[in-house]
Image (tube, rainbow, N blue to C red):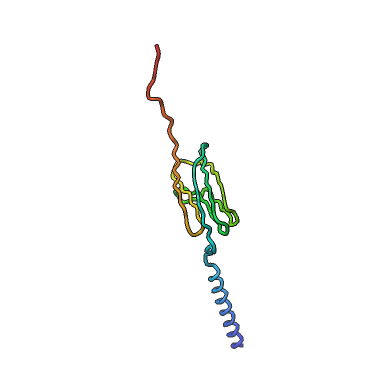
């Protein structure tokens, strides 16, 4: 009886150890196997919107993010592996004044653009003309 119990205990221990080691090896972060080279352009439109253009190679994904100073993502859009171009127009008129960052990444390299939103105060005319 003792030998049977010891054999079962050893077999169970080896099973648990093997299973935990195999799970630990499979939980490694996945690095992209192929990264796509990309080019970007940012500009504002006459309506005050932010236009983002991304041209990239096929075979790798590119992620576009708009972040505030706290690091919170306000906008996230992934350009898929099979797409070569992406054009995005963001309405930033509802965002409060402050500093923002546009980050475009292919998993290996990041391109960061600083974006400052500031509302201009209305100007009061400096001279007054009165007629009698």
Left or right, 35 with reference to 99: right
Q: Residue 113's spot in the image, x, y percent?
A: 45, 49
Tell me the residue at 52%/67% (across/down): 28
Farthest top residue in view = 132
79 to 18, vertically: above or below: above
3 to 49, vertically: above or below: below
Please identify the quadrant where the C terminus is shown.
top left
Q: Residue 19's spot in the image, x, y percent?
A: 57, 74
Farthest left residue in view = 127
Tell me the residue at 44%/43% (across/down): 116
Q: Residue 68's spot in the image, x, y percent?
A: 47, 48
Left or right, 33 with reference to 125: right
Of residues 46 and 103, which is closer to you in this image? 46
Q: Residue 83's spot in the image, x, y percent?
A: 59, 54
Tell me the residue at 57%/51% (across/down): 85
92 to 61, vertically: above or below: above
Please identify the quadrant where the N terminus is shown.
bottom right
Tell me the residue at 56%/71% (across/down): 23
Q: How many numbered discs sit on the rendered protein?
A: 0
């Amino acid at each position: 009886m003792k030998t049977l119990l010891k054999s079962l205990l050893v077999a169970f221990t080896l099973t648990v150890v093997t299973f935990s080691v195999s799970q630990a090896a499979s939980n490694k972060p996945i690095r992209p196997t192929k990264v796509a080279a990309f080019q970007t352009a940012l500009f504002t439109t006459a309506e005050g919107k932010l236009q983002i253009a991304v041209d990239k190679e096929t075979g790798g994904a590119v992620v576009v993010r708009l972040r505030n100073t706290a690091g919170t993502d306000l906008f996230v859009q992934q350009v898929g592996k099979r797409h070569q171009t992406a054009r995005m127009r963001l309405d930033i008129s509802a965002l409060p004044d402050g500093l923002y960052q546009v980050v475009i990444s292919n998993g290996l390299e990041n391109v960061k653009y600083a974006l400052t939103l500031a509302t201009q105060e209305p100007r009061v005319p400096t001279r007054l003309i009165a007629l009698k």
